[in-house]
């Protein structure tokens, strides 16, 4: 299934990433700070999750 990531607007194959635990709340906070119109239920692609995870770790 293909969908458009609501953060990067790229069409990607696969499922939406679901955030499930407290450590991922930090990723959600960073995404929202850089994309104020984004809401968690819009979903996000795995590439964006990895990008923001690296931002949190100071690798980006």
Image (cartoon, grey):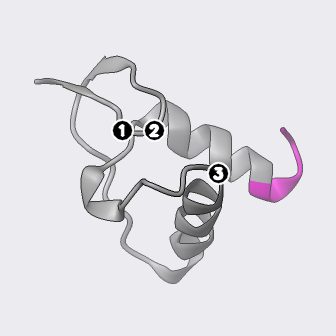
Q: Residue at x 59, y 68 (%)?
A: 29
| Rendered residue at 30%/20% (across/down) | 12
Q: CB of mark 1 within 8 Å of CB of mark 2?
A: yes
> Which residue appears at 59% of the width and 41% of the height?
50
Give the mark nearest the N terminus, 2 or 3.
2
Q: CA distance from mark 3 to mark 1?
A: 12 Å
- Graded by Cα atoms within 10 Å as few (under 14), some (14 to 19) or many (20 or more), the crowding at tag 2 reads some
Mark number displayed over residue 20: none
Name, please, the residue furthest toward the left.
Answer: 1
CA distance for labels 2 and 3: 9 Å
From the image, which quarter does the N terminus lie in? top left
Residue 18 horizontal/vertical position (percent): 31, 58
Q: Secondary structure at mark 2?
A: loop
Residue beneath disc 3? 34
Q: Earlier in the sequence, mark 3 or mark 1?
A: 1
**Dot 1 corresponds to which residue?**
6
- Report whether 27 appears left or right of 56: left
**Magenta range:** 56-60
Residue 2 as seen in the image, left or right of residue 36: left
The answer to whether 21 is drawn above or below residue 42 in the figure is below
Disc sitting over residue 7 in the figure: 2
């Amino acid at each position: 299934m293909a969908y458009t990531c609501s953060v990067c607007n790229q069409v990607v194959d696969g499922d939406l990433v679901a955030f499930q635990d407290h450590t991922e709340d930090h990723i959600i906070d960073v995404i929202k700070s850089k994309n104020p119109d984004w809401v968690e239920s819009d979903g996000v692609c795995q590439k964006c999750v990895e990008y923001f995870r690296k931002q949190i770790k100071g690798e980006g």
